Amino acid sequence: MRNSFFDQSLDAGAIRRRVQELSTGKVGFYSVGLYPASLAYNCAMQNAKGRLLLAPRPGRDLLGAFPQETIATMDDEHVETVLNMGGNRIGGELVANTLSDLIQRCELVVLSANSNHIEEDLQEACRLRKELHREQVVLACLAGSFSHDPISNSAYVLCEQQPELAFFSGFHRHGALRNPFDSFTANFCHPNALTAMLGAQLMDQLSPNIQVSAGVHNVEGQFIKAAKNMASVFAGFGYGFHQDNPGVLPTLLTLLLNQCLDQAATVSMARPDRQRLYHRQPFPLTELGYAVPRIESTLVRDGDFERVRDHTFSQLTAMVADVRGSMMLPVSGSPTRNFQAGQVMAEAMRDQGRCPHSMEELEQWCEAAGLRKGGLEGLKSLRYWPQIARKYAIPANDASMVNLLYMAIYGRAGVKETAYRVMTESRELSSYCQESVRPSHSRRYAEALQNLDVPKALELVVNAVIADNANQAMGSKMALDENGETGVPAYLELMDVIESQLDA
């Protein structure tokens, strides 16, 4: 899929005219949910109408994502403005816009559906662009979940499958977007720096309250959002269950944030277009606001240094703020829906003294609390987590928190009992947070020093002292006597299960 504001012409005059068209271009949001409708309301409050168009999915109401009590608090004049953004008056009757209308009238179209519809919408948008001879309309998405192919039974990040698909994201709260005095940041990412800059400018002009900056990391951005949604569920659980144990929360939240970024850094190294991302740009990434062109780190694997991470995307402030903000209780208003799902999970686990029997039961708990399961992208992403971890070779110590959440929902009965203890006992959870971030080989030495009466443990320590045998010692799996010890802490039991079942 080619996705650019320009055709491949070298005619300076034609390009000049196209740049001028873009300076006054419109942005369209298709399949309107809470965020696009809230953004439209913000534009209406700021008298910034005219640059934003909406088109609801067929059969859906433009404001259908809002509860009736929320709509009742909105200004009637602003609501009317929003409705006019979503349609045309024909004979006094408002006729809703379609995806075809947006492609015909806009220069940038954001496909705002979640993972249930985004791939179908993208396919249809590409077809319409060609049919309408509007192939220079740029397409973007904001879906925060992994995609899944039922035929091959594989999960993936959509922006990796479609490398030129733009991604738009930032920190926002739907209620706050209806506050005329609050302001918000976002990132518009496209692997071509010029397209990213022009797209960010179009988005930035929608409302004076919205500040949008450009970036090239669309794959990483979409992964971060999916990982953030899972982390937000765990954060909501932490606040809900450990509100009387505030000592564990800072550690938990810090680890959730760091692991989201570390996972995305590993995914970044797997990009097939990674060299082009850095070497074939029309201008340096520092012109987009990046502090440096690259931030790379190394890890030690079996005694050897290997380059495995690229953290350049972490300079996209809005995306990092999105992770932080989604794991916090707001000063006013409600937390994110995924955070609320975690709170529901905490309350039910406290009442019933166990983990949910299945994802279906957890979704029932959420539905009973007024949360529609279709909007819980974090739970959707969790379904495909083992496939994602294997596909991108994400180390277990970089994903220990989402692994714990996964086991609490999808593990066998015995594993769920252990996961329940780790998640609900403050000491077990803090120990898990501390120990699970270590690579498995480094943890083996700590365990060996505490079990010197076990011959294999002593042998491991002796081999480590002998420099010539150090690599062999790190590469071999230490197998302690599983029948001799019965008092192993729950967090260590669970780490062993996770590493044997989920570690790529």
Image (tube, rainbow, N blue to C red):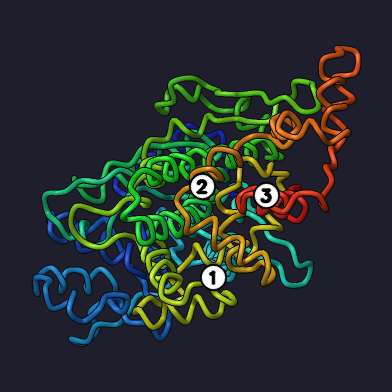
Give the alpha-carbon distance from disc 1 to disc 3, as whole Å.
Answer: 21 Å
Which residue corresponds to the image point at 54% horizontal and 63% vertical from the top-left? 420
Tag 1, which secondary structure? loop
Callout 2: SS: helix
Q: CA distance from mark 2 to mark 1?
A: 26 Å
Please name whichever residue, 435 or 81, is drawn nearer the observer in this view of the structure.
Answer: 435
Left-right relation of 32 to 11? left
Amino acid type at image mark 2: Ile
Left or right of 90, for residue 310: right
**Residue at 42% from the left image edge and 70% from the top image edge:** 350
- Which amino acid type is marked by label 3? Val
Q: Which residue is mark 2?
A: 224
Residue at image position (68%, 29%) is 275
Q: Residues within 10 Å of mark 3 (few under 14, many from 20)?
A: few
Specify the amino acid type for callout 1.
Answer: Cys
Residue at 46% in and 57% down:
234
Foreground mark, 1 or 3, reads: 3
Nearer to us of marks 2 and 1 is 1
Q: Distance between the Cα atoms at labels 2 and 3?
A: 34 Å
Q: Which residue carries the number 1 mark? A: 355
Which badge, 2 or 3, comes first in the chain's sequence?
2
Label placed on residue 488: 3
